[in-house]
Amino acid sequence: MEIILLERIEKLGQMGDTVRVKDGYARNFLLPQKKALLATSENKTRFETEKEALQRINDDKRGIAESAAKLLNGKDFILIRQAGDTMQLFGSVTARDISTSISETGVSVKRQQIKLDIPIKTLGLHNVSIVLHPEVIISVKINVARSKEEAEIQIKGGTVTSELENEKQNNIVDKEIFDNEQIAADAEEKLSDNQNLEQNENKINVNGAHEESISETDGAPSQTHDPK
């Protein structure tokens, strides 16, 4: 199908260009969105008549988009999501989610303006393009994390995985220290028990020897002095 573009369309052309596109693309998107007209002789005449007005409208829209771009371009947007240790989300971040997050800043962005081929399914920083106007395209950073603390780590250039590994390593070290301390405590307790046992045995031996000495003294015949 041959159409006349009413605005710049990426990979198609500029305003006023006559191009051929698939029928479905024209009927389902370009024509309903008023981004193009059927390239009939009547519409070609109409476009030439309205060209200047259309250009002014386009310039106004571009100006608004450029103002929004100054507020949004390069900004980070934090989205908190649940995820496992493998970085995989329990769900996903969609264009609608990003649109909602950006719109909270006061700049309205429709999900159709967000260039996201597939939903985001992992933690981390993701660069996403936003089409504010056919001639104004910006990039924002979507920071997907499980908490604000993790989001801060990612913003500073760290990775959640490295932090998890550090935490895991620290847990291992703590466990080793605990185990070593436990071993030392057990050894000290065992040594103390052995010393107590040895002291008790020595005490028993001393008492036994003393009792035996008394017994021998009691059983010995008494000697009397026989005067001569």
Image (spheres, rainbow, N blue to C red):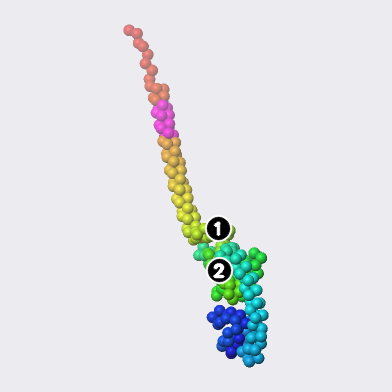
Q: Quadrant of residue 83?
A: bottom right
Residue under numbered circle 1: 152
Q: Nearer the viewer, residue 207 or 57?
A: 57
Farthest residue, direction bottom: 41
Total count of labels = 2
Query: Which kind of residue does numbered mark 2 sit on?
Result: Ser
Give the structural element (helix, strand or loop) at label 2. Answer: strand
* C-alpha span from label 2 to label 1: 20 Å
Residue 125: give x, y in percent of width and height: 53, 65
Q: Is residue 132 above or below residue 6?
A: above
Give the structural element (helix, strand or loop) at label 1. Answer: helix
Q: Confirm or deny contact between disc 2 and disc 1 (CB under 8 A).
A: no
Q: Quadrant of residue 68?
A: bottom right
In this rendering, would 77 be left or right of 173? right
Q: Dot 1 surroundings within 10 Å: few (below 14), some, or many (20 or more)? A: some
What residue appears at the point 61 percent right and 65 percent down from the top-left corner? 71
Whether the magenta-drawn stretch holds residue 117 is answered as no
Where does the magenta region start and end?
199-212
Q: Is residue 223 above or below residue 78?
A: above
**Which quadrant of the figure contains the C terminus?**
top left
What residue appears at the point 46 percent right and 46 percent down from the top-left corner? 182
Q: Earlier in the sequence, mark 2 or mark 1?
A: 2
Residue under numbered circle 2: 139
**Which quadrant of the figure contains the N terminus?**
bottom right
